Amino acid sequence: MINDFSDFIKGLTKEFTSVVDPVYTNADYIAIDLSKANTAITYVLTKNSLAFEAYIKEYLINHNAKVAYGGYDEYRNLYDRSAHFDDQGLGGKRTFHLGLDVWCDAGTKVVAPLSGVIHSFKNNDLHGDYGPTIIVQHTIQGEVFYTLYGHLSIESLETVFVGQQVAKGAVLGFLGDASVNGDYAPHLHFQLIRDIGEYQGDYPGVSTKMEKMKYLENCPNPNLLLKIRS
């Protein structure tokens, strides 16, 4: 087993790699801060998902961009509105984000940045959860690891099956809207997972402060692979 998993992931790509429709180039992306320090998003979240979506769209227009991204190891209050993230014996409220979010329109293609096989899939339909989710297993240079794609459309799960071969760049599914994606503005939650344990179609995407380092070690920064705006 490779000791430095982060370095291994970083070495798998040499340049910007798409995880949503490759019609968007690296220049189309803009970083966005949705941490607790962003008081504007706190205000938006007191309203509804339509206000959330309008906030994202306005942010993109103001920055002359088409896709917003960010959120790895971000301390957020997005999850205060859902009991799904309350203390479940894990050491307090889950507030630290473990994946990378890619914010763009519902219906946008989600593509595989690496080849692999479908490990599992599930509609995680609790309020604030992933909604439709696909997990792909990868075996590269003898290393087995996983990528998770959350907040997809319902239709994305209709033709997928466990063991299905996935080619690099293949369309895995499409982004869902707030009615199916956990009640968020449309986006992809993309997460790297080294050891998935017994999880099927799901894996924690947000951690408590107490367990944060354990999860970050198992889930390195996805931008090491994607190299957005690097």
Image: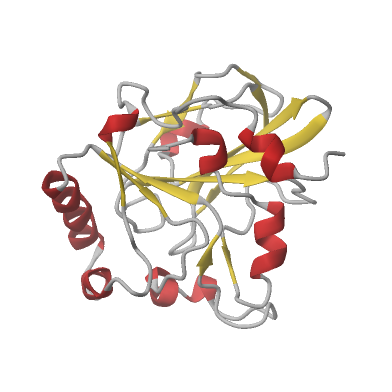
User: Vertically, is 123 above or below 140?
Assistant: below
The answer to whether any part of residue 120 appears in the image is no
- In the rendered image, the quadrant that contains the N terminus is top right
Which is more toward the observer, 189 or 221?
Answer: 221
Say which quarter of the image contains residue 3.
Answer: top right
Which is more toward the observer, 151 or 6?
Answer: 6
Expressed as whole percent of the image width and height from the top left, the position of residue 88 reads: 65, 78
Q: Residue at x 57, y 46 (%)?
A: 191
The answer to whether any part of residue 14 appears in the image is yes
User: Vertically, is 70 above or below 95?
Assistant: above
Outermost residue, front direction? 230
Residue 85 located left or right of residue 218: left
Residue 48 located left or right of residue 151: left
Residue 76 located left or right of residue 12: left
Expressed as whole percent of the image width and height from the top left, the position of residue 181 reads: 40, 51
Which is more toward the observer, 101 or 72?
Answer: 72
Q: Residue at x 69, y 40 (%)?
A: 7
User: Vertically, is 10 above or below 97?
Assistant: above
The colour mode here is: secondary structure
Residue 30 located left or right of residue 74: left
Q: How many marks?
A: 0
- In the rendered image, the quadrant that contains the C terminus is top left
Expressed as whole percent of the image width and height from the top left, the position of residue 155 reads: 42, 32
Expressed as whole percent of the image width and height from the top left, the position of residue 115 reads: 63, 21
